[in-house]
Amino acid sequence: MPTRGGSTKTTTTTDASLRVVFLGGLGEIGRNCFCLESEGRVLVVDCGIMFPDVDMPGVDLVLPDFTYLRERADAVEGVVLTHAHEDHAGGLSFLLRDVSFPIYGSALSLGLAQNRIAEAGLLDRTELIPIADGERRRIGPFECEFIPVTHSVPHAFAVAYHTPAGTVLHTGDFKLDLEPVDGRTTDLARIGEIARRDGGVRLLLSDSTNAERPGFTPSESSVGASLRTLFRDCDGKRLIVACFASHLHRVQQVAQAAVATGRKVAFVGRSMIQNVALAREVGVLDVPADSVIDIDATLQLPPGEVCIVCTGSQGEPMSALSLMAAREHQRVKVDDDDVVVISAHAIPGNETNVSRVIDALHRAGADVVHAGTASVHVSGHASQEELKLLIGLVQPEWFVPVHGEYRHLVHHVRLARQAGVPPENAVVCEDGDALTLDSDGLAVERRAVPAGYLYVDGIVGDVGHGVLRDRRSLAEEGVVVVIVTVDAVTGELVTEPELVTRGWVHEPEADELIEGARAAVRASVEEAVADGTVDFDAVRRHARRALGRYINKRTRRRPAVIPVVVEV
Ligand SMILES: [Zn+2]
Ligand SMILES: [Zn+2]
């Protein structure tokens, strides 16, 4: 039996303690980032972004709040990258502006993450240190062991942190795929060994994405089988398959199915072309060279001999698939000779875009196959039975679910209790919480560090809650600006008040309303001046109040009202 609970406390963990600080990913899918702190040194695990919701107008992406790390910039030993999905690696090029650090990850993860860092011109602020499967490496005071796991990008890691306060196991994003495309399975044997050693695993941090989903997640190989059947059924048609550019095992299986049905393969979309080149270079992707052709060369072939693999599975507006759907793609014109396969699941927030693209493809005459109509996609995350299996194998002393919305974390805690973790030792934590693991057990400090959303619009800075609130209110109610020109000495109106509005009223009702609004402002300012007001702030207040009252009375709307007083 593994040593657990009381027996752990007899080991030599007297005054050693480890702090775990969650900066993101606990309460949302995205911006995954947590820190380990020991002996005054900090190791960061993943540094991801989140894609914006519809209620964040104009926001490009959302970052973790890096205040905690900026304040400890000199103590940061490095970042461990479990894998290179955007929700784990997308924030690196932002954090590197404030803090310089090396990044540890599989060669493929580093290769995939490198482009964004290079685009930001920050490669000189870091060192990319490749790690092999099973490797153990000391990073500052942290003894890290990198364990292979299966996921929807090849060469992902779980990491065991062996510290004086005990071992912490972080699964990273994972599933228990027993037939992975590359044969590299999750190393359950090694995880079992770590669990059985003296002290066992004191704290397990595990991926909660699919904690609500019963059963087992099907193997990635099952998609290959469906694709082969589908491709055979599409005899004579051109195939256009969209998937994540980082899902190289999916790309591999699409290419195999294409070659098996006598097709040539062309890759389209910047990140698809980049990632395929990298994957072929590091030996992750194996497609016969004579089966790969340029997109222009596909135009010389009959449709039934072509398979295009492209980006845009999330309906991203400027992606290859969206351009094809809008008939704006330079090379690929979609028509009724095409079958489009969307081999992905829409990330929350992207559903509307994906559905719009599917509609547009139908308008263009194409047939569309997606996860809702055929088995052309499986998840990269473990479902309930896999999660319980892992917890049962690890038998951690403490369990904290990570990587999920709040409800996923709650369900994961229930699974942990079913799998034998003592109820009081399975705890839901949120962004900003900090854990202290020592010989007394695990202490949770709620909201220990700043962990709010950092909204990025363009290339810099935090847009801030105030700006977002303004944008939402402008989007919903519009704006009315009134310009009042007054005599600098007497305060009397020099000209008629001018009104400029966006999003308040629409012609033809506008003329009469705007005329009424001008009259209301004029009357109010004249009255104020007659009472002896020559203070421009007071004039501005009068104009705002009169206009706001008029708008509310006549239209029951609440646009932003902005008075401008010009003195001449
Ligand atoms: Zn992932
Ligand atoms: Zn993830």
Image: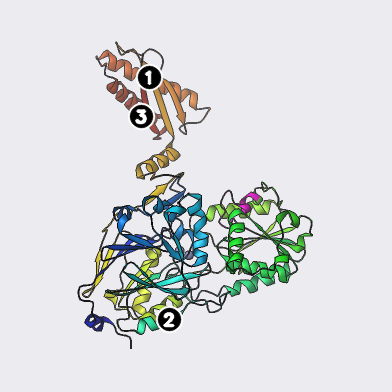
Locate residue 15 relative to residue 364 in the image: left or right.
left
Identify the amino acid type marked 2.
Answer: Arg
* Mark sitting on residue 520: none
Q: Which residue is mark 2?
A: 190
* Mark toward the start of the polypeptide (1 vs 3): 1
- Which of the two marks, 2 or 1, is nearer to us in this view? 2
Tell me, yes or no, if residue 267 can be seen here. yes
Q: Is mark 2 within 8 Å of ligand 1?
A: no
| 320 within the magenta span | yes
Asked whether disc 2 touches disc 1, contact meaning CB atoms under 8 Å apart, the reply is no
Q: CA distance from mark 2 to mark 1?
A: 75 Å
Crowd band around label 1 with a 10 angstrom C-alpha radius: few (<14), some (14–19), many (20+): many
CA distance for labels 3 and 2: 68 Å
- The numbered mark, 3 or 2, whose residue comes first in the sequence reads 2
Mark 1 to mark 3 CA distance (whole Å)? 15 Å
Pinpoint residue 261: horizontal percent, then vertical percent.
Answer: 73, 70
Read off the residue under disc 3.
548
Q: Based on the picture, tell me whether residue 105 belongs to the magenta stretch.
A: no
Mark 3 touching mark 2, by CB under 8 A? Answer: no
Q: Tag 1: residue type?
A: Val
- Crowding at dot 2, Cα within 10 Å, few <14 / some 14-19 / many 20+, comes out as few
Query: Which range of residues does the magenta coloring cover?
Result: 310-323
Q: Which residue is mark 1?
A: 484
Q: Is residue 56 above or below residue 245?
A: above
Residue 230 seen anywhere in this rendered image of the structure: no
Judged by depth in the image, the label closer to the viewer, 1 or 3, is 1
